[in-house]
Image (cartoon, helix red, strand yellow):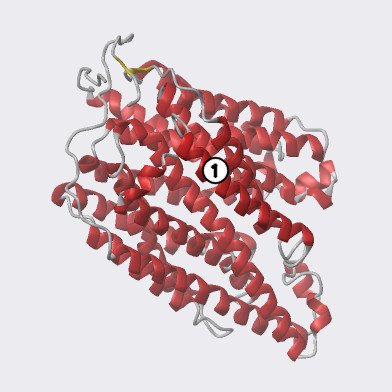
Amino acid sequence: MSESAAPPRPRHLLVVIGAVLIAMVLAMLDNLILSTAMPSIVSDLGGLDHLSWVVTAYMLATAVSTPVWGKVGDMYGRKGTFMTAIVVFLVGSALAGTSQDMTQLIAFRALQGLGGGGLMVGALAIVSSLVSPREQGKFQGMMSAVMGVTMIGGPLAGGAITDHLGWRWCFYVNLPLGVLALVMIGLVLRLPRVRSTARIDIAGVVTLATAITSVVLVTTWGGNEYGWTSPTILGLGALAVAAGALFVLAERRAAEPLLPLGLFRTANFSLVTLIGFVLGFAMIGGTTFLPLFQQSVQGASATNAGLLGLPMSLGMILVNAVVGPMVTRTGRYKAVIVAGGALVGLGMALLSTMDVGTSPVTTGVYMAVLGIGMGCLMQTTMLVTFQSVEPKDMGVGASTATLSRTIGGSVGVAIVGTVFAGQVRDVMAARGFGKLTEGSAQLSADGLDRLPQAMRDAYEHAVAAGTHQAFLLAAGAGLVAFLAAWFVREVPLRDTAAVAMATDPDPESARTPA
């Protein structure tokens, strides 16, 4: 194995980091922008009954392709794999913008999602390859700032684009950003060539894709399209378990496994993967219902509910501006992870105390606590992941960390959503308005305005009760993250990058995976 190359020029490294951040924006921005365009899409294309698949198709394709992109990058080169993922994403975006009916849109969203699965993984793997774990803290604030701004600006940008340019431009806006990232990566990034004679682990791909698909469909359909005890949901659950077992068998026999099971023998890798799962559970499962509380109980508009998320996003950004350089300077990170788990649990517990009398200012303070905790965990656990794997497995490390958060969020939404809906219906039934929420636990803003005052008061109390239960569950997930963090071992951070960025435009260095 040969990793030797000339040291990177700082100017070029910053250009690569800029391209990587653009790819991260594309990966995060798409669903955020599209959420505000959904009514216009239905008005133009029809197909209301299939609207949920516009999101589900993308999410499913992203989840299934994530581990594949990570492994292919490790085996055949991260630069080419990353650029291919960007191209697939852009082709899907362009086609989605030309959709003439809902079936076409769903199909093109799936193609877009296949590319999207490689964006975040490729970005993280490239950064972890070029920047040593000790130095990665310097870039945490930058990444968190991009994520925070995207979370805030995505829905606002989606509304502005839909109102002034039309919903199709929610997809077309990806094209100039993606092309810019491609040009920057193509011209500047030079990594040692990677050649592998091993075959792709087809059995691993098929069995893991089957397991992931089954889990996502269970969490998407359960309690909505089908009852939790229906044959469809139970069958999908059994298929997920069977496919998972076959995946383990396949990985033990594969010459170049899709996910080397030996990685989980490293305690830190297993622990931060678990923390990533419960962070996804808490973060997505809990905060999904926060805008509903703000709109239904506190009377915020949809736009204002988005702006009210500022305290959480700013908390993430600010804490990483401090924590990143601190980790780089001291090399100490365990205390940050422990504090992050504690603050996520505390923030969720505080949010669970909200009721019909809670002011938006109080909610904002609670959200800031949660945001600080999330900021402590998100990038620091990723750093530990890359510290815990060999350089040849950076892509696998990135895909495992990303997938664990994705699956955790999917499971969190399903479980927390079921508890929330059940609580809303129970409270409404106890107050004599059970029929109001038959088939759905959520009413639109227009529907709320048309309710008699007694019904509206009952619904506000019901949503507050459902939110209480949702955040209690999320707080429990935060507690698991806190407990797991105590077992993370503080291994000294490496001072060297996995590879160096070559200055020769056609480097001859090559390596063969170990």
Which image quadrant for residue 75? Answer: top left
- Three-letter code for the amino acid on which mark 1 is drawn: Phe
Percent across and percent down for residue 405 are: 48, 53
Percent across and percent down for residue 166 are: 72, 39
Looking at the image, residue 109 lies above or below residue 271? above
Point 30% across, 11% down: residue = 507
**SS for dot 1:** helix
Question: Which quadrant holds the N terminus?
Answer: top left
What is the crowding at mark 1: few (fewer than 14 residues within 10 Å), some, or many (at least 20)? many
Question: Which quadrant holds the C terminus?
Answer: top left
Percent across and percent down for residue 382 are: 35, 48
Residue 285, visible in the rendered structure: yes
Looking at the image, residue 474 lies above or below residue 500? below
Frontmost residue, 9 versus 116: 116
Point 39% across, 41% down: residue = 397
Frontmost residue, 36 versus 499: 499
- Determine the residue located farthest toward the left in the rendered image: 330
Location of mark 1 (residue): 247
Point 81% across, 78% down: residue = 436
Frontmost residue, 160 versus 200: 200
Residue 23, visible in the rendered structure: no
- Determine the residue located farthest toward the bottom in the rendered image: 431
Looking at the image, residue 462 lies above or below residue 496? below
Looking at the image, residue 510 lies above or below residue 49? above
Percent across and percent down for residue 456 are: 73, 82
How many marks do you count on the picture? 1
